Each structure stands twice: as structure tokens, then as C-alpha cells.
Amino acid sequence: MSNRTRMRQARALRVAAREWARHTLRRLTRQARMAWLISLFGALLSACGGGAASGQPTPASAAHASPSASVTYTAGDMRGAGVNVEPSYRPWRYVDGPAPESWWCQPPNCSPEQLPRTKIDTDLQLARQLGVDHIRVEFPWRFIETQRGVYDWTRADLIVSEAQFYGVQLQPVVVYSPAWVGNPTAAPNPADFHDFMSTLVSRYHATISHWELWNEPDLDKYWSAGEQAYVQSILIPGYQGVKAADPSGQVILGGPSTPSADWLEGIYQYGGGDSFDIMAWHMYGDVGAVLGSANTALDVLVAHHQASKPLWIGEYGVEDSLLHDSAQSSLLTGVLTAQSPIAQADWYNLRDEASMECCPPTVAVMGHYGLVERDGVTHKSGFATLQRLISAGLPRVQAPQG
């Protein structure tokens, strides 16, 4: 029996088990659900040959069965596929707090009008249907540490607990300086960011193993203090804070908006080359552009003798306003099945969104990057394509050179 056949059979077993589990869970109390899930996930991992240890991808539903473990890149690892959910905050547009379309929205300013839990649960159910191994979601420092040393964990706790319940692994992106620092894009005191990351990781390290330090810090609208300040105020102290709380936690470089070789080289120039475990970047364009961007990032790693670090593309995607257009399907297929060094590719976005401006709240830009329409119900053809690709089994990652 070929490896691919065994992989498909194992995946089919996991899918069937999850569906049986979903129906069974409806009859249990929430407390009983969690205990039952832990027991079930352990059994599934054993039945599937140990998951990642056997060279097969670890199922998303098993990600919370044990504390985080160190992830070391090995040539031939299975490629991962994830999705992004809506950004938490757009201070250049919606000035009155969290983005109304995001998991961090504050009633009554949630759009469409629904409770945050409903929005979160809808997206997590969609992610589980897709079978993705990560959801990339912002954890805004600004909305968590409301005063120095004073934390509001309400929304973060909800997000983490719901992700656990649905068996979906979170990939948090920590972004935006708090009000007591000043502007959300301003550089904080490095010690303050170190302490925040240590506190954050200490709280969630049992279920979250990957932490991305900022979003697109090469753009002023996310980070206005320059690259050197990013390295010295965010990357280095953030890395140290993560490792202090969880030595096995994996730190993802804050993905720049494009894989500029000059910007990536600057990370090393300013002393940050040893302060990330995973190289990340974003790229929008056709299949050739996305795959080519991976070579740019890999060349930088090779030049600094770090070719063993995984390459993760945190955002790629294309707008598709029609249900049966081929644009999304073509890009997904090309990126996820090609021979390339990309180890993880996170599609942007899970569902369409209306980017709001304030005040009063009005739609500024309608984005059609989602695999699902804004209603959270209507699937585009790209949804079925990604679901099928994951179910069939993504290829192994091409061995890096250097």
C-alpha cells in the first residue's frame, strides 16, 4: 500500500471519527465534552500511527490533546494549510475600537449584528469543515492589557476555549501597542512587550504553540517606528518572553507585506536573526509570484545559514465575488500542490468582509477574498477546492538548499 493511500485512509478515518464525535457531543454537558474529547483524541492519534511522528499531518482536532511541543523543520514534512479570519482593528479607518467584522468586535458595534460568540463559532465550524490545521487570528495587545499590568482576558479566553471545543489550532498574531504606550503603531518599551508576551504565553501555552510577533511591520499603518525599532522593541524581547514562558513555543517573524530581500536582511542587520523560529511573509498575486516569493525568503535564510527554518506564507489570496469563479481554486491548487519550500500557507480570508469606517459606522470597502460569503453560510467554489486538497493530502515540502 502506498504512503498516499495510507494517508488518505487515515484522513478518512479521522473525518468519520470527528463527525461521529460531533453528534455524540450534543448529548454531553460542556464539562463532560472536554474530558471525553481528550480521551478520544489520544485514541485517534494512536490509531493513526502517532500522527506527526509517522510522517503524516497531525489532525487539527488532536492539536489540544497535549501541551505545545517544539516543531523542528525536516525536509519532507507535510505542507500545512491554514486560513485567516478578519483583522481585529484598523485604526486608520475605524477609529472607535475593534473592527465590527472581527472576533474582537464590541456590541452593539458588531456587523452583521450578532453576538461575538456567534461570529467566532460560525468561523470555527467553517474551519473545521475545511480541515485546516491553523487559524491565523490577531490578538491585539491594545485590547488585552488595558493598563500596564491590568489585563482583560474576556475575549481572548472565549476565543481560546471555543477553538479548543471545535478542535482548531490558533495561530495568534500579536499586534498593536496599548493606549498607555500611545499610538497603536508606536514602539513600546521592550521590557513591557517582553512581560506581555510572557504573561500571554503562560496563560495559553497548553493549547497554543505558535506566536507571530506583529503583522506587516514593514507598513506604517501597522508599525510606524521603523525596522530597527521592530527588531529591538518587538522581535527580540517578544522572542525572549515567549521562550521564558514556554521554551518549546515557536516564534513566527511578523510577516512583511511582501518578501523584500532588503527588509528581511534588515532583521539580521539589527540583530534579530536568532529571535524567530519560523520565517514568514505575505504575497498576493498569481501562482508564479507566490511561489517565487518563497525563493526570495529562502535565499535570505540560506545566506545566514538558517535554511532549516520553516517558510510560512501568512497571507495569500485573490478576490472572487462569484460563487463559481475559478480564480481562488486555481491559486489554492497551484500554491498548495506545487513543489516548493513553503511549509505552511494561510489563505486570506475565510469569509468576505465589509471593512468599516467610523463614525457613524459605514462600509468603506467590501472585500471578496473569502472562501465563504459574508453570511458565513454560502460557500464559493474555492471552499470545496481547499477542502478537497486537504482531504486528499498535501504534498511534502521540498528540501531547502544551503
Image: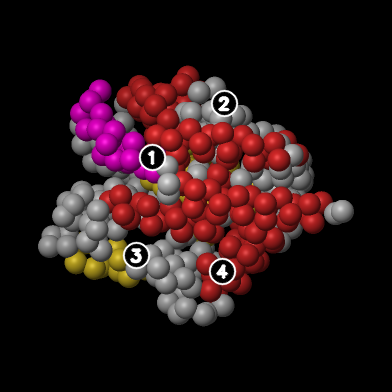
Determine contact: label 3, label 2, CB under 8 Å.
no
The disc label shown at residue 41, or none? none
Q: Which residue is drawn at 42% across and 24% down?
A: 202
Quadrant location of residue 184?
top left
Q: Residue 197's x, y, as percent?
A: 40, 28
Q: Residue 60's x, y, as percent?
A: 56, 46
Question: Mark 3, residues whose alpha carbon is within 10 Å: few (<14), some, or many (≥20)?
Answer: many
Q: In this picture, which residue range is highlighted in magenta?
A: 139-163
Q: What residue type is labelled 2?
A: Ser
Question: Mark 4, residues whose alpha carbon is within 10 Å: few (<14), some, or many (≥20)?
Answer: some
The disc label shown at residue 384, or none? 4
Q: Residue at x 53, y 48 (%)?
A: 21
Q: Is residue 154 left or right of residue 20?
A: left
Disc 2 element:
loop
Q: Which residue in the structure is indicated by mark 1?
A: 29
The answer to which of marks 2 and 4 sits earlier in the sequence is: 2
Q: What residue type is labelled 1?
A: Thr
Looking at the picture, tell me which residue is in the foreground, 1 or 33: 33
Quadrant location of residue 146?
top left
Disc 3 element:
strand
Q: Which residue is drawn at 25% across and 23% down?
A: 149
Q: In this view, does 17 lie to the left or right of 182?
A: right
Q: Which residue in the structure is indicated by mark 3?
A: 353
Q: How far apart are marks 1 and 2 (CA)?
A: 33 Å
Q: Is residue 352 visible?
A: no
